[in-house]
Image (cartoon, rainbow, N blue to C red):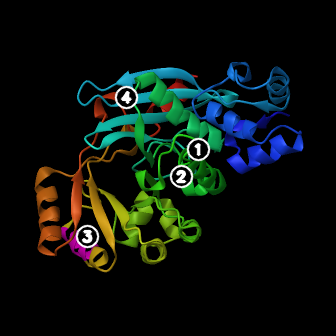
Amino acid sequence: MKQDIKSMLPDELAEYIDSIGEQSFRSQQIFSWLHKGTFDFSDMTNLPADLRSKLNDEFYISCPVSAEKHVSKKDGTIKYLLQVKNDDFIECVLMEHVHGNTLCVSSQVGCKMGCMICASALAGFKRDLTASEMIDQVLFASKDSNKRVSNIVLMGIGEPLDNFENMIRFIKLVSHPKGLNIGARHITLSTCGITENIDRLAEYDVQLTLAISLHAPDDETRSYLIPRNKISNVESLLKSAEKYFKTTGRRVTFEYALIEGINDSTEQAELLSIQMKKIAGHLNLIELNTIPENGLIPAGKESTIDFTGILIKNGVNFTIRRSKGADIKAACGQLRNRRNSEK
């Protein structure tokens, strides 16, 4: 079977080039071609023909196909449904901000976590994405939109920490100076709370931003919204977040979508305030993306005012994050679910 060349790190490419007796600089040329978005070895015109032929015999270059593209009339957000190998579908979302263009990247085909507020798991889990398939999302969105991707959020379909090795490889590749050169400080990784892998990530000391999908301060509510909480409860999750901060020096972001009648009570606001004051983190209050299958609705104006009022009174550092792309169903997994239903 052919190997996935775009998932190879520079030192792995150099080792291969050395093993076949080619000059060492050839590996740098190959790496550059791959991360400029070249999908055919024959286009690598500064390589000898016999080397191009050998590469074609031993490797393949991953290449996504556009299945759908939707552009928001409200804010210009672009959502792509991409077809990858095995006829699988994934999504990525390009959002324009004052500080640059941010791409929301998927890490798996489907998801195992079953979080209520996310559509990623509704069509089931199929497989992990390779590092190359994550890189391809960045290359594709940048080329199609003619916009440089300056920031990445691993918040698309899938749980990044459940695909740990490929995720780490992706970060090394996408941040490499000879590649796309998107530094780790411009990458945010969102997790529902796999605490053992948060601890592993801390030991790697990658200077990315860790975002934890909290969504409730108490175990009963959070276990309803995020089943993973039954394995790693709120207390253990906060301990891992604190350990991550102490190890890396990077403040953790906590995501909290206000949901009517579920997690928007004044009692929960008080408990959340206590937790946030104990930890070096920042709270993002998110407008809930409506997903018909889960029956959840965003918190009303009155309860939102009461909730945020308590946070302000208690001196909690928080931001209200505006939802983007609602008119094109930009929430994770919605396009994939519809496509799978049609199939």
Q: CA distance from mark 2 to mark 4?
A: 22 Å
Q: Which residues are magenta?
A: 266-273
Mark 1 vs 2, N-terminal side: 1
What amino acid type should be assigned to the residue bearing mark 3? Gln
Q: Characterize the local packing of mark 2: few (<14), some (14-19) or many (20 or more) Cα atoms within 10 angstroms.
A: many
In the picture as drawn, the residue positioned furthest to the right comes out as: 20
The residue labelled by disc 1 is: 108
Q: Which mark is residue 159?
A: 2
Please give the residue where the numbered disc 3 appears in the rendered image.
268
Q: Earlier in the sequence, mark 2 or mark 4?
A: 4
Q: Earlier in the sequence, mark 1 or mark 4?
A: 4
The residue that appears at 26% across and 75% down in the rendered structure is 271
Are the residues at dot 1 and dot 3 in contact (C-beta closer than 8 Å)? no
- For label 4, the residue is 78
Q: Position of residue 224 (x, y in %)?
A: 42, 61
**The residue tagged with tag 2: helix, strand or loop?**
loop
Q: Circles 2 and 4: CB distance less than 8 Å?
A: no
